[in-house]
Image (tube, coloured by chain):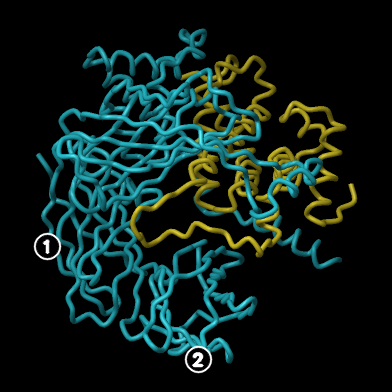
Chain colours: A cyan, B yellow
Amino acid sequence: MSDKNEKWNDLLNQSFEYPEALSGVENRLEKRIIKKQRNRRTLLSSISAIAASLLFVILVNTSTAFASIVSDIPLIGKLAEYVKFDKGLSNAVENDYVQEVNLTAWDENEKLLLPYVIADEKNLVLFFQLPQEFKQESNQWVNIKLQEMFDGISGEKIEGFSYSTSSLPAEGREQNNGLIMQDYHFSEGNLPRSIDIEVIVEMETFINSQDERVVFDEVAETEKGPIIEEIGTFRFHIDFEKFGEPITYVLNENQIIMGQEIIVEDMVVYPTGTEVTFRFPKENTAWIKGLELEVEQTGDILYKGSNGISGTHDEENNWMRVYIESNYFEEPKKQELVIKGIRLLDKEEEFITIDLDNKTINPVIDGTELQEVIKHSGKADLIFSTITTNDDSFGMFSHQYKDEEGNYYEYKEEGSYITDSLMKTKITVEYPVSGKIILQRSLTPKLLLEEPIRISLPLQE
Amino acid sequence: MLGAKGIDKKSYISLVTENKEMMYRVAFGYLRNETKALDAVDEAVYLGYVHSHELKEPKFLKTWLTRILINECYKILRKDKREVIMELLPEETYNIADDSLSLKLAVQNLPEDLRKIIVLRYFGGYTISETAEIIEIPEGTVATRTRKALGILRVEISE
């Protein structure tokens, strides 16, 4: 059998390695059906104008009597589809924590809509919408990129946040009513009550058919990838409704994990997300670079790490905030904060010297090797191989490196991927005169605790 | 609570039990991640249940459920497609080294019309005829696209 065919069979066989959780599909389905029925009864008992429209959506999804109007689901019903991967945001939408802003911005003849937002002090979710008349071919994706954000009252530029954004392909556009979601998290400071935001709408055109390969090569001579065209720049002024008051749990719990002291300071629950703050004494011998958290109730996982954002820390690594889904709209019940995993970086192994000529790392790092050094045009591609588990993927190095004289440089190129429990990381550097560079390690493989740490959360009134 | 006309909850759940392994393999073929594949399966079986009254013929439930599953996989892929960080954050790496095409990535990088065929036929185990029914294209087109996809992947499989 050819090598390629062997790899093909290995690839197919991986899909036959069924996880244990697959056996619970039926139970999870039954629980969701019961919960949906319960939510419908709860909504029926407290009707408001907006709740009535939400009720309409839920009834449309579950009752044959409304089957004929399934195709006319109001736009707000689509939001639930977009946020369903985040239990906290799903609950926010179900509990009517959505602000209808109905804004429109123009750039000459192009228009962009902003019908809904979800906001609290720490998180902002924007639902942009392309107008119906916006033309999009089957091989085109629409992206929205943030340019700038300002405080809507003081005019100060807002910084210290991160965001993730969805893209919209032509396929599925009708189903999604042309919605594009952006999710902002304000790790430093709070979201102001009013903002001015400027975004760019781009069209990405993919040439993905072999028949058109010649055309692609002619057009994309100097760069690979899709063709990007700017559609327009759009500005919005948003005044937010009163943010939901956060719920604070003061914990001040000292824990020792793998010989390192961790102080769980507090947990603050906002309508759209939860922040758990940790402090680390200077006496620790390792930096705490990441923590995997869950909120559990009677052994069931209720809320876990938020998709796309897991945590931030200060420059000295004295504190860290970890983000998980919110349980803001849940009835108060006995719950536990569970620490399931940790990323540790030995302080003495934070900086490593790479000898490009001899392909060595000093000090030696367990589980990581410098697999390849490829010299080209005065540069070098360094390919590292790190043992990892459960498709755990992370950034190994800080974005800068230095030479032995202490001069700093930025990477030319950086990328990573996982294959068969090995994470390959590639960086491209200028080939150093001395043949050596010094890298600063950033993250390490996640270690799952054999005995997770459980912290009881006080019952809130 | 009834789903499709003539299909009660118990029968629907039996169908899920019968097909969940196949569904997982299809989702895994698309998403290459155990957790995301499970999420896609969970979501698809739930949506299949709440929308099953829209299904005209109960005998097409399996095909219909597979289509819902594929849409769920697209949604997850779309959600993962872009992540832009304004400040340096730990945990996520986002760029795939473009000179590293393992077979896994090669499948992911196939044009969508070919990837769908490969995932259904070789991960899902569907025949040409079943695949044609799910995607709603002629059987001949399924066969042609299969050969094309295997050619791109440089895998030789006798049909």
The residue that label 1 is drawn on is A252
- Residue B131: horizontal and vertical position, in percent? 76, 34
Q: Nearer the viewer, mark 1 or mark 2?
A: 2
- Residue A40: horizontal and vertical position, in percent? 33, 20
Q: Which mark is residue B77?
A: none
Tell me where residue A277 sits by quadrant. bottom left
Callout 2 amino acid = Ser
Q: Kindly indicate whether the residue at mark 2 contacts the one at mark 1 (C-beta within 8 angstroms).
A: no
* Direction from residue A230 to residue A241 in the image, left or right: left
- Residue A90: horizontal and vertical position, in percent? 35, 34
Residue at left 27%, top 19%? A43
- In this view, the residue in front, A448 or A133, is A133
Vertical position of residue A380 compared to residue A246: above or below: below
**Circle 1 crowding by C-alpha within 10 Å: few under 14, some 14–19, many from 20:** some
| Callout count | 2
Tell me where residue B4 sits by quadrant. top right
Callout 1 amino acid = Asn
- Determine the secondary structure under disc 2: loop
Residue at left 53%, top 58%? B95
Q: Residue furthest right?
A: B158
Q: Which mark is residue A434?
A: 2
Tell me where residue B155 sits by quadrant. bottom right
Real-space Cα separation, disc 1 to disc 2, in angstroms: 49 Å
Chain designation of label 1: A
- Residue A17: horizontal and vertical position, in percent? 62, 57
Q: Nearer the N terminus, badge 1 or badge 2?
A: 1
Chain designation of label 2: A
Position of the N terminus of chain A, as image quadrant, is: bottom right
- In this view, the residue in front, B20 or A349, is A349
